[in-house]
């Protein structure tokens, strides 16, 4: 089974050698999750924003291997590629296959729901993430820690290279800031479309969260005045 390998510019190309037993397919979503855990963020990374960025990463990977084509902002399904990891295969199988097909941003909201938890669980099951032992009845589970592995090193090397797709997704998730003049590097029109949709969805999510916070604060003030 061919493996997906990324060049420094974010292209996805089939690897002609088969993966060894226990070897994990390296995808943009997986790289982004490793980066979110290894790189100190410029602001707190929220689960919703990171889930939207992971969904965008899946679209980019699926487009690169021919599993979908972007027609404007619509995701037109293609044949399922032979090389996928389990979550990427699930993403391909969940594409809407009837016209007028699904807009990128609609996909991000639908696919992104709970996606961070799904990737975290998958990488934990593969032994690529570990959790330190904590208190038995802790309010929150301990933050997962990446285990030393080729997959983690691959993500670190891609991050260090400044590859623009991973950098832009990380900026959308709040891991890093976007340069004033944008990210350098040749990006295809479909990739630009996906990155723009991720940015718009994140902006909308932040606005909804802020509006709810204001409404809850106003409600609390009403009860205090009673």
Image: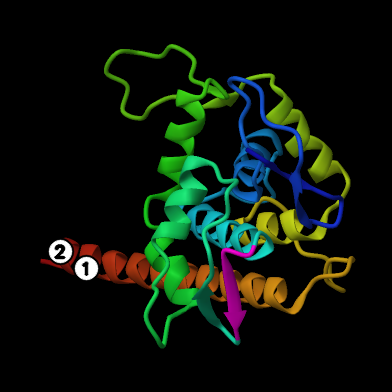
Q: Which residue is mark 2?
A: 223
Name the residue at the left extreme.
Answer: 226
State the residue in front, 224 or 82.
82
Residues in magenta?
A: 66-71
Left or right relative to 208: residue 194: right
Left or right relative to 226: residue 198: right
State the residue in front, 154 or 177.
154
Secondary structure beneath disc 2?
A: helix
Left or right relative to 151: residue 111: left
Residue 7: percent from left, percent from top? 84, 50
Residue 84: percent from left, percent from top? 56, 46
Q: CA distance from mark 1 to mark 2?
A: 7 Å
Asked if labels 2 and 1 touch by Cβ distance under 8 angstroms, the answer is yes
Quarter occupied by residue 197? bottom right
- Find out whether residue 206 is within the magenta segment: no
Residue 193: percent from left, percent from top? 65, 78
Q: Which residue is mark 1?
A: 219
Residue that appears at 64% across and 45% down:
27
Against 210, is 70 above or below? below
Residue that appears at 79% across and 56% down:
10
Residue that appears at 39% across and 61% down:
94
Closer to the observer: label 1 or label 2?
1
């Amino acid at each position: 089974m061919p493996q997906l390998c990324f060049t420094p510019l974010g292209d996805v190309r089939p690897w002609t050698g088969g993966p060894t037993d226990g070897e994990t397919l390296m995808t943009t979503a997986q790289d982004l999750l490793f980066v979110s855990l290894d790189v100190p963020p410029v602001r707190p990374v929220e689960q919703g924003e990171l889930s939207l960025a992971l969904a965008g990463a899946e679209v980019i990977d699926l487009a690169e291997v021919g599993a979908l084509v972007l027609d404007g902002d619509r995701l037109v399904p293609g044949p399922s590629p032979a090389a996928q990891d389990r979550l990427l295969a699930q993403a391909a199988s969940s594409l809407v296959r009837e016209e007028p097909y699904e807009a990128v941003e609609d996909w991000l909201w639908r696919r992104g729901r709970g996606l961070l938890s799904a990737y975290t669980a998958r990488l934990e099951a593969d032994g690529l993430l570990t959790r330190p032992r904590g208190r038995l009845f802790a309010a929150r589970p301990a933050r997962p820690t990446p285990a030393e592995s080729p997959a983690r090193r691959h993500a670190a090397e891609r991050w260090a290279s400044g590859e623009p797709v991973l950098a832009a997704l990380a900026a959308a998730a709040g891991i890093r800031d976007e340069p004033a003049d944008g990210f350098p590097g040749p990006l295809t029109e479909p990739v630009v479309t996906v990155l723009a949709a991720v940015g718009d969805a994140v902006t909308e999510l932040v606005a909804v969260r802020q509006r709810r916070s204001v409404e809850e604060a106003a409600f609390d003030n009403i009860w205090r005045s009673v």
